[in-house]
Structures are given as structure tokens and as C-alpha cells.
């Protein structure tokens, strides 16, 4: 089995490390591969879209021919997780910032996003988040975080902060406004792997 991490930009090595540790915890054999060009996504059984600069990521996914491969993967029902910028890219609609920068969205989750919902880099914070699939709170790291302002009826809201949705899932797609790869707590990655195994 192969698990892909989009490696064009962002927290790539941190996600790879977290996934490899989570797989080792489970005792599962699965190769974690990084993706910088087209042709690798179709070989993968699951995919992670990491944080980074969403406008740049969106453009490069199109330019490299990866965006259509991700859409095909979603149509096949394979698990996809997006964190921070990944949450933005998964959405069907965005705010005026998304429109102004001609942000490319993959449209895999019926959501509308606010790209800078929690302010700029200096407004980064940690929050004890209650997630329905965890028995105890999760210390979530938010860095220049986006948020979901509207979600369709098929979207399951997993967590909110002050009426802003920060974690959600729709079928095989999981989106989070925070960075689970920046903590030693592997429970979010394990939840994602539950969709694969």
C-alpha cells in the first residue's frame, strides 16, 4: 500500500514522520511517498494535502497536472486529508481573498472557507479541541489558520471555535484548520488511517 503526501510546499516532512510513526504504532505495512509531479497520485491508496501557502499550492497542483489526479482519487472514494491550506484547497467556495487571488479550489468538500479566519502569523495559537472521535481533548496548533464558514448538509462538523468550523469530514475527505503534524499526539493521523485500514 502507498500513502501520498503532496510535497510541493509546506509541512511535508512533519506529515511524513507523523504518518510513519502512526503506521508503526498500528503495525501496518504502508509506504509513505512524497508527491511533486503527476503520475504518483494514481498509485496511492490515501493522500494528505499539507499546510503551506494555499494560492501557490493551488497553482502548482494545476501546473503539475496533480489536481485532476486528486479529483479522480476522490471519485474513487480513497481517503484524503487536508490540513490548514489543505482545508482551503478541498473547499468548493471561498471568501473575497480567495476570489481576489484567483485561488484554485479542488471542490471536494461542500464548504465555503475564510482563508484567514484566525488572523495572521502572529495570531497563531494552541487550543484544547474536543473531537468526537477522541476520548480526551486534542491540543491543536493553529498557524495563520483558515476556517469553514458554511458547510453543506452532507458535511459532518467535527469541531468549532466561536462558530467557526475547524474540523469536518464528508465521506472519504477529512479537513482540519490546524496542524496535527506539529504535535507528538498522533490520534488525528490514526483517525485518518482508520479510513484506510
Image (spheres, grey):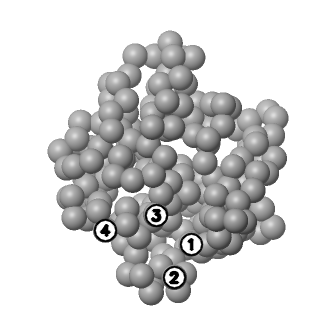
Q: Which quarter of the image is occupied by the N terminus?
A: top left
Residue 186, position as x, y percentages in the image: 63, 31
* Element on which disc 4 rests: helix
Residue 27, position as x, y percentages in the image: 50, 12
Q: Residue at x 45, y 33 (%)?
A: 16
Residue 174, position as x, y percentages in the image: 53, 49
Q: Nearer the viewer, residue 185 or 93?
A: 185
Q: Nearer the viewer, residue 23 or 122?
A: 122
For label 4, the crowd category at 10 Å Cα-Cα, with few meaning under 14, some 14 to 19 and many 20 or more, is some
For label 3, the crowd category at 10 Å Cα-Cα, with few meaning under 14, some 14 to 19 and many 20 or more, is some
Q: Which residue is mark 1?
A: 115
Q: Which residue is mark 3?
A: 53
Residue 66 visible in the picture:
yes
Q: Earlier in the sequence, mark 3 or mark 1?
A: 3
**In this view, 8 is above or below 53:** above
Quadrant of the image occupied by residue 160: bottom right
Q: Earlier in the sequence, mark 1 or mark 4?
A: 4
Q: Which residue is mark 2?
A: 97
Q: Residue at x 25, y 55 (%)?
A: 66
Left or right relative to 69: residue 24: right
- The single residue placed furthest to the left in the displayed view is 39
Dot in front, 3 or 1: 3
Q: Nearer the viewer, residue 125 or 73?
A: 125
For the residues labelled 2 and 3, the Cα–Cα distance comes to 13 Å
Q: Earlier in the sequence, mark 1 or mark 2?
A: 2
Amino acid at each position: 500500500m502507498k500513502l501520498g503526501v503532496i510535497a510541493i510546499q509546506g509541512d511535508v516532512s512533519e506529515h511524513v514522520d507523523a504518518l510513519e510513526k502512526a503506521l508503526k504504532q498500528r503495525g501496518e505495512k504502508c509506504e509513505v511517498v512524497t508527491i511533486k509531479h503527476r503520475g504518483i497520485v494514481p498509485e496511492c491508496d490515501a493522500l494528505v494535502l499539507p499546510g503551506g501557502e494555499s494560492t501557490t499550492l493551488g497553482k502548482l497542483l494545476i501546473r503539475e497536472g496533480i489536481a485532476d489526479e486528486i479529483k479522480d482519487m476522490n471519485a474513487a472514494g480513497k481517503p484524503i486529508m487536508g490540513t490548514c491550506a489543505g482545508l482551503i484547497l478541498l473547499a468548493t467556495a471561498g471568501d473575497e481573498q480567495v476570489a481576489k487571488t484567483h485561488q484554485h479550489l479542488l471542490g471536494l468538500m461542500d464548504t465555503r472557507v475564510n482563508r484567514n479566519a484566525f488572523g495572521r502569523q502572529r495570531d497563531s495559537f494552541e487550543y484544547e479541541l474536543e473531537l468526537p472521535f477522541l476520548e480526551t481533548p486534542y491540543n491543536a496548533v493553529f498557524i495563520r489558520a483558515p476556517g469553514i464558514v458554511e458547510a453543506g448538509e452532507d458535511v459532518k462538523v467535527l469541531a468549532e471555535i466561536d462558530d467557526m468550523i475547524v474540523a469536518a469530514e464528508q465521506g472519504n475527505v477529512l479537513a482540519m484548520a490546524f496542524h496535527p503534524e506539529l504535535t507528538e499526539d498522533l490520534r488525528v493521523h490514526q483517525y485518518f488511517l482508520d479510513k484506510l485500514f
